[in-house]
Image: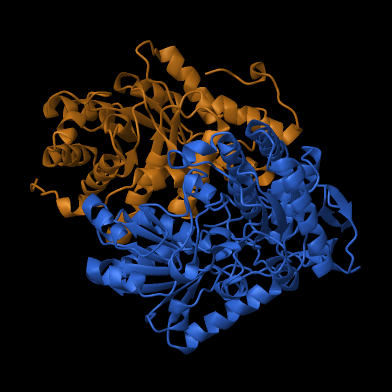
Amino acid sequence: MTGIFEYAPAPETTKPVIREEYGLFINGEWSAPKSGTYFDTINPANEQHLARVAHADAEDVDRAVRAARKAYDKYWRNMKPADRAKYIFRIARAITERSRELAVLETLDGGKPIKESRDFDVPTSAAHFFYYAGWADKLEWAMRAGRQAHPIGVAGQIVPWNFPLLMAAWKLAPALACGNTVVLKPAETTPLTALALAQIVQEADLPPGVVNVIPGDGATGAALVNGEVDKIAFTGSTEVGKAIQRALAGTGKRLTLELGGKAAHIVFADAPLDQAVEGIVNGIYFNQGHVCCAGSRLLVEERVHEEIVVRLTERLQTLRLGDPLDKNTDIGAINSRAQLEKIHELVRSGIDQGAVLVQQSCAIPDRGFFFPASFFTNVQQSHRIAREEIFGPVLSILTFRTPDEAIEKANNTPYGLSAGIWTDKGSKNMYVAQHMRAGVVWCNTFNQFDPSSPFGGYRESGFGREGGVHGLYEYLAH
Amino acid sequence: MRALRLNEETMTATVDAVMLEARAGALSKRSIKTTAKVAGIRLAIACMDLTTLEGKDSEGRVRSLCAKAIAPAPHLPDVPSVAAVCVYPNLVAVAKESLRGSSVKVASVATAFPSGLSSLEVKLADTQAAIASGADEIDMVIDRGAFLAGHYQQVFDEIVAVKNVCGDVHLKVILETGELGSYDNVRAASDLALEAGADVIKTSTGKVGTNATFPVAVTMCEAIRDYARRTGRRAGLKVAGGVRTTKQALTYLVIVKETLGESWLTPDLFRIGASSLLDDLLMQYEKERTGHYAGPDYFPKD
């Protein structure tokens, strides 16, 4: 008997104010782009137009960088640290006060489920501002004895589309706390929450030019990288990250890169299996798998492989895919058509190479970009789906027999951002964690974030840390 | 009766508290509105063991509870009867007589409820007396002291013995999860009770500080699901103690639906044991129907 207790639609009803058109936020003011060009941002869940957004060209970038430079020299670098903290606290409080509105905006523009933007993206963003506001007048305590804390100057920050507001918060909060000024470039498909953050900055009455927000595409980002900035902080693809590093070589500009990943998620036979399955689900289906640290390579001890597959197959059927604004939606929309096509392409390659695809059976909405929660069994280390970042709700399952084999397979990737380990045995957990070449290792959990905890990668997943005391060093002069 | 040996291999599943509580927390955030809420309230009523287990219980009190069990809200004809009335053994006969002709069953606590600290002979006699008085269902308690001391075979044997006395009478085994101290123990006790033949495993007596909680319910559902997968036998879940609000009741329905599936949402396989919950369910039901809350005096007490 089915249909006895079906969830009724539960749409979030808050309506955020979305302007028809957004300019560039430069020097504390909104201005039209010199280029005169605008681009449309759409709702990926129904492909409807949301707003026209100014596209910054090289001249606009230069304008923004000059505004930031002036603000750095005139106001921010010499401001009493406690006063800087007050401004940052103000931003944190404003995010909290407008949390529901920001959550809806994030979901509309990016496609992620409202429960995630409401319970994760927005509160964690506010938490980062609160955390780093607290550091602003205590920077000496982060330094070795006898050393002074000095800002770097103007930071160019380029953020991705998977966590638009949160990544902006991760970048802005430590930069500002350390006394730097900022030019922020949000991603092309998700500019709206960064622009809302610009409005918050304006209402918080920060001195003009301390924070500048200039939407645009890759060309805008390249102009920023080549601009008169002292530091670039980039989160995005490994390919673009490499290009940035090449461009900056020899310039003396500081750089942090937070790039792709193909995280190993290791499940031992003695793990609490039901919770491990929850960890797997959270690890790969959170934010439709648009997560650089997603646990996309599941390594299962051979003797529980079948059991895990059975449990995971059952669990997939309870995931609710659909309208991201519905409070009961677990899997929202893929961020863009281009990303959806990339996922389809990699999934086809998995099938062609002989892996076996398992998917949730559910209706896929006619409009918008959706992909069902999926996983592959019979995956070999050499398959593309085991090596390349899919950045979608697609998991590859491989097996191992001993802890050392798990370690070897886990590390056999050019990436090194995160890893997860499930076992009931503490000593094994610690042993395997010690041997992971990954910036973050989660033991009996996955995707846990806190402003006080540093996050970042090894090898082709980038370098530099965001969060915690470590995050400060990326914005302080050596 | 042939002595059965407990296979402790069936009790090896472990539970991670952090992720379990995160999962239970996520399930408790499901948004149950409009038609789902109305359906959920009706379901919660149909699956309810309307309970009175107080030292001051009397025949009059039980009669009035039974009248409410048959027709919880006479002015709302689409509200179903509850599943059962749950009383002490001495009051089974009164309940049975009051419920004659209705679909409502009589459940009796037994086996030296709530502590379970009597001899097996006393426990079996207690059970027999309740059944002789007409009980359709028995809610027994396990000996938590024996369980925590690791005397699993003893706990198992007692359940088997009570089940033997019960025959076709439905046996619910109360684990008293608030006294078990860890989710690992909740899982192990669930596995043990299911192996011993429990028709239903039940969280609590309602007589200790911690009663049913969402993570405990998730753990017990997982045990029931795994047991059904292994043996093909579908056992039930009863949550009891501290379930007072519609929101809590709906969350338990969500937990069962998303862990065991909708086919478990029947009075045969799911029960909520509660005394005051019914009043809140009726108030919320009326609110969904009329758009506003009626005062508590518009619903019969008891």
What is the x, y in percent for residue A460?
A: 48, 71
In the image, the chain rendered in blue is A
Q: Residue at x 38, y 43 (%)?
A: B237
In the rendered view, does B30 fall on the left or right side of A306? right
* Residue A196 can be seen in this image: no
What is the x, y in percent for residue A247?
A: 62, 74
Furthest-front residue in view?
A146
Furthest-top residue in view?
B56
Above/below status of A67 relative to B137: below
Q: Residue at x 48, y 36 (%)?
A: A141
What is the x, y in percent for residue B221?
A: 38, 48
Count of residue discs: 0
What is the x, y in percent for residue B16?
A: 33, 47
Furthest-bottom residue in view?
A352
Above/below status of B193 relative to A36: above
**Quarter of image, res A41:** bottom right
Given residues A230 and B71, the one toward you in this image is A230
In the rendered view, does B2 fall on the left or right side of A221? left
Tell me what hue chain B is rendered in.
orange
Given residues A304 and B216, the one toward you in this image is A304
* Residue B144 can be seen in this image: yes
Above/below status of B300 relative to B146: above
Q: Residue at x 47, y 60 (%)?
A: A283
In the rendered view, does A143 fall on the left or right side of B56? right
